[in-house]
Image: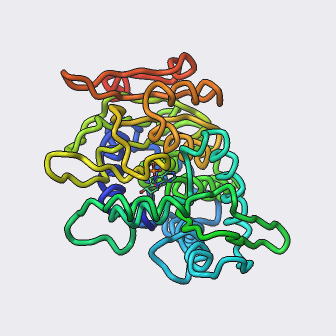
Amino acid sequence: MRWLARAGLAIAFPLLLLLAGCQGNEGVTRLSGTTMGTLWHVSVVDVPEGYSAKSLTAAIQQVLDEVNERFSTYRPSSDVERVNAAPVGKWVPVSGQVVAVARFSEKIYRDSGGAFNPAVGALVNLWGFGPNAPPEPRIPSDEAIAKARASIDYGKLAIRDEPPALMKPVPLTLDYSAVAKGYGVDRVAERLDELGVSDYLVEVGGEVRVRGHNGHGKPWRIGIDTPDVIGDEAYAAIAMSTGAVATSGDYRNYFDKDGKRYSHTIDPVTGRPITHNLASVTVIATTCMDADAVATAIDVLGPERGLAYAKKRALPVYLIVKTANGFEQRYSVSMKSYLRTPEQTASG
Ligand code: AMP
Ligand code: MG
């Protein structure tokens, strides 16, 4: 998928370092694999009856393979790419999964005032963050940006439940990369629920959902990366027994040109990569799809409008803001009870 090895691998490793350092690995079975151009990791306290680590890994991989097959922008056969390739006005049959994500995305698109917009695909491609990324980054012309911006009206997408299908009444290029990893995490969590697993941590490329407790019988601990390029240190940590956490930021997936950084997150208003001083945003929600979409929305909105949006949605949010001397943290009142220092986390 589009979020790329560049971003995902880098995000997954530091998180895992932190997890390895504090999750009480003795009592935990750790499973892993690759999906959506990144890594996935699952920790379970008990492997369910009738399963081995190997067969549980295969079951999780199957869930994620299906999500990838639906949403990948790198596979012409995926549901999303079939919709993108279809002519305007034609209904394209898709999986119920795609309809669910398309509808949920519409809600976040509307209540974020269009900051979260899964129809930014043409702009993502134009800026070189798509599947056909050029070897050398280039800055598109104003004309090319204006042209791509003319086809990002996600509110126009027609979504049908029965039989599940999507239709573009106007030209649109769909890209659910900002929400599909979170959605994949939710699907895996639901599979584990069905199998009767009561204590787990699921992570896909840095997006996380947990249930129950870790190997020490304590809430799961999740690291928030220091938002720099090296990034093998946690800036802060979250302790949580139920729920999901997602992070967006400009510190992994970007290009530098003429001394300027260009993020993979596009502001639909300008048609250009975001330029504010928000280095990363971490959101807690019940589902990982929600946390993932809202984290991207806040990443677009920037620190002030982003915090206001999180308050409107009543979601705990943690921002790391760039300052002249480094970084500064800002968080909503509801985030406070989840926060731990990395030192507290390392001591178990
Ligand atoms: P995330 O890492 O979840 O914030 O997702 C970032 C990815 O979402 C980018 O690589 C793009 O493919 C896509 N994207 C970029 N800008 C937006 C936006 N404003 N709304 C929704 N998706 C976006
Ligand atoms: Mg996201």
Confirm whether residue 209 shows in the render. no
Between 225 and 221, the one nearer to me in the picture: 225
Place of residue 222 in the rendered image (x, y in percent of width and height, measured from the top left)? 43, 36
Of the 4 image quadrants, the one containing the N terminus is bottom left
Place of residue 122 in the rendered image (x, y in percent of width and height, measured from the top left)? 47, 66
Q: Is residue 44 left or right of residue 108?
A: left
Relative vertical location of residue 299 with respect to residue 32 in this rendering, above or below? above
Relative vertical location of residue 211 with respect to residue 50 in this rendering, above or below? above
Relative vertical location of residue 228 with respect to residue 78 in this rendering, above or below? above
Confirm whether residue 151 shows in the render. yes
Place of residue 294 in the rendered image (x, y in percent of width and height, measured from the top left)? 56, 41
Between 111 and 41, the one nearer to me in the picture: 111
Residue beneath the point at 30% across and 34% down: 234
Between 32 and 231, the one nearer to me in the picture: 231
Colouring used for the render: rainbow
Q: Is residue 290 left or right of residue 329?
A: right
Residue beneath the point at 51% across and 82% down: 76
Answer with the quarter of the image where residue 132 lies.
bottom left
Answer with the quarter of the image where residue 210 lies.
top right
Of the 4 image quadrants, the one containing the C terminus is top left
Relative vertical location of residue 62 with respect to residue 196 in this rendering, above or below? below
Place of residue 325 in the rendered image (x, y in percent of width and height, measured from the top left)? 18, 21
Q: Is residue 334 left or right of residue 21?
A: right
